[in-house]
Amino acid sequence: MIMTYEWAEITDFADELGQMILQSEQADLYRAAYASVYNDKNLADEIQAFARLKDQYEEVQRFGKYHPEYSRVMKQIRVDKRRLDLNEKVANLRLAENELQDLMDQVSFILGRSVSEAVKIPSSNPFFSSESSCGGSCGTGGGCSCSA
């Protein structure tokens, strides 16, 4: 593809938009929450241990209740997940992630709608998903008006 002035201008605007997002309050809160979680050595070790347990969980899921470690792994994964979920630093990180994701969804929505009303906009927010041209019913065998 030949780089035209318009394409160069679009890439410059995209870079500028990316910098604005990186400098946003939501991104700052996310970076601070991330640092808070992963600078705490004990918490970082707990997260790594949970990641290893998730690998065991996936192995157990392949065989189901017939796996010899099924009961132990299933119980332990629930206990450890609950403990991490109740940790204030982890909860703050999740909130910051959600706020940053909401910002990204809003930007995607605005960009998509500026191109065309028919643009499908992937989103984790049901508000933006319902506003997309698809409506989320593509799995019904062509019941919606989009061209999936």
Image (cartoon, helix red, strand yellow):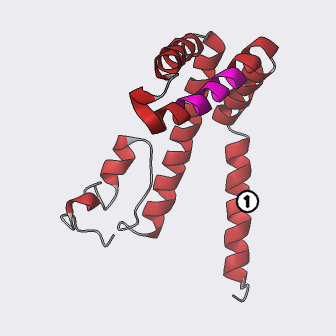
Specify whether 2 is left or right of 80.
right
Which quadrant of the structure image shows residue 3?
A: bottom right
Q: Position of residue 41 (x, y in %)?
A: 81, 15
Q: Position of residue 54 (x, y in %)?
A: 58, 29
Q: Nearer the viewer, residue 74 or 6?
A: 74
Given the image, on which type of amino acid does mark 1 rest? Asp
- Residue reaching furthest to the bottom: 2
Residue 56, above or below 128: above
**What kind of element bears circle 1?**
helix
> Per the image, is 86 magenta?
no
Q: Nearer the viewer, residue 66 or 81?
A: 66
Q: Which residues are magenta?
A: 47-57
Quadrant position of the N terminus in the picture: bottom right
- Residue reaching furthest to the left: 143
Q: Nearer the viewer, residue 93 or 72?
A: 72
At 69% from the left and 63% from the top, the residue drawn is: 13
> Per the image, is 50 magenta?
yes
At 47% from the left and 23% from the top, the residue drawn is: 70
Residue 66, above or below 1: above
Specify whether 106 is left or right of 53.
left
Q: Nearer the viewer, residue 4 or 122?
A: 122
Q: Position of residue 29 (x, y in %)?
A: 68, 27
Quadrant position of the C terminus in the picture: bottom left
Q: For label 1, count other residues whose C-alpha is less than 10 Å away and answer few (under 14), some (14-19) or many (20+).
A: few
Specify whether 50 is left or right of 37.
left
Give the residue at mark 1.
15
At 41% from the left and 69% from the top, the residue drawn is: 116
Which quadrant of the structure image shows residue 38?
A: top right
At 57% from the left and 10% from the top, the residue drawn is: 83
- Number of numbered callouts drawn: 1
Secondary structure mainly formed by the magenta segment: helix
Residue 31, above or below 139: above
